[in-house]
Image (cartoon, grey):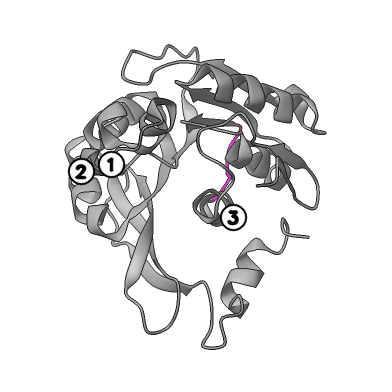
Amino acid sequence: MTTEFRFKQFIVKHDRCAMKVGTDGVLLGSWVSPEGNRAFDIGCGTGLIALMLAQRNPNLNIIGIDIDEEAVEQAKENAENSRWNERIEIKKHDFNDDFLSSEPFDLIVSNPPFYKEDTNCPDQTRNKARHSSSLPISVLMEKSSKLLSPQGKVAVIVPYSAATDTISEAAIAGLYLRRRTDVKTTPRKAAIRVMLEFSRDTEPATRNELLLRDDTGEWSKEYKLLTQDFYL
């Protein structure tokens, strides 16, 4: 496995991280609306999404946190080696504990752990990064709501099967669905992921579908268009 992943404007090393650069992170970083001046990446891993946000919005300052020390050190390295190092700050922190911020965030993003405990693998570090027990959706939404600016947004990517629970937990926290994109790998397969964006606004949400690959197995036009600013 390669130790780094090269994008158009930055490089992400991921040899020390439990969770490597993957399609989920690229999807969320490309799809989310990076508006405002302050963003918060919860469970930042390699720092991929933080780097994508920094590239997309030159006025955005991003804080990323992760529970894993090795991931934090590598995310710091990736941020420091980028052209946006002055706008990205990485910290070791467990979001289950209170996170103190002097100012609210305009955007909160997370590619949260979502695999169930019956899929545990021997690597305990990878388990922490992958399993919902390390950061329940209810906690993610409740605490995010408290840190969000009045017009701010929360965006996550979750398995299709977890979409309904995620939307319900967000509503309990006072956050309502504004945008939803169901992600399918191929035309004939069911959706496997869902990208969800929440705000305090109660207007009806928009919903669409994104196909990753076409009938020939090639990346779809929609996926290429979404990610064109990042992939070489």
In this view, the residue in front, 208 or 136, is: 136
Question: Image check: 115 left or right of 25?
Answer: left
**Start and end of the magenta stretch?**
33-37
Are circles 1 and 2 on residues that touch, CB within 8 Å?
A: yes
Image location of residue 151, percent across then percent down: 43, 39
Is residue 35 covered in magenta? yes
Q: Position of residue 147 (x, y in %)?
A: 39, 24
State the separation of the CA atoms marked 3 and 1: 22 Å
Q: Is residue 173 above or below residue 146?
A: below
Left or right: where does residue 199 sit relative to residue 16? left
Crowding at dot 1, Cα within 10 Å, few <14 / some 14-19 / many 20+, comes out as many
Could you say whether the residue bearing mark 2 is in a helix, strand or loop?
helix
In the image shown, does 128 or 58 lie closer to the viewer? Answer: 128
Hey, what amino acid is under mark 2?
Ala
Circle on res. 30: 3
Q: Would you identify the image quadrant in which residue 80 lies?
A: top right
Distance Cα–Cα, label 3 vs label 2:
25 Å
* Residue at the spot 43% in from the left edge and 33% down from the top edge: 126
Quarter holding residue 91: top right
Q: Which residue is mark 1?
A: 175
Which residue is located at x 41 percent, y 30 percent? 123
Please name the residue that numbered disc 2 is placed on. 171
Q: Closer to the camera: disc 3 or disc 1?
A: 3
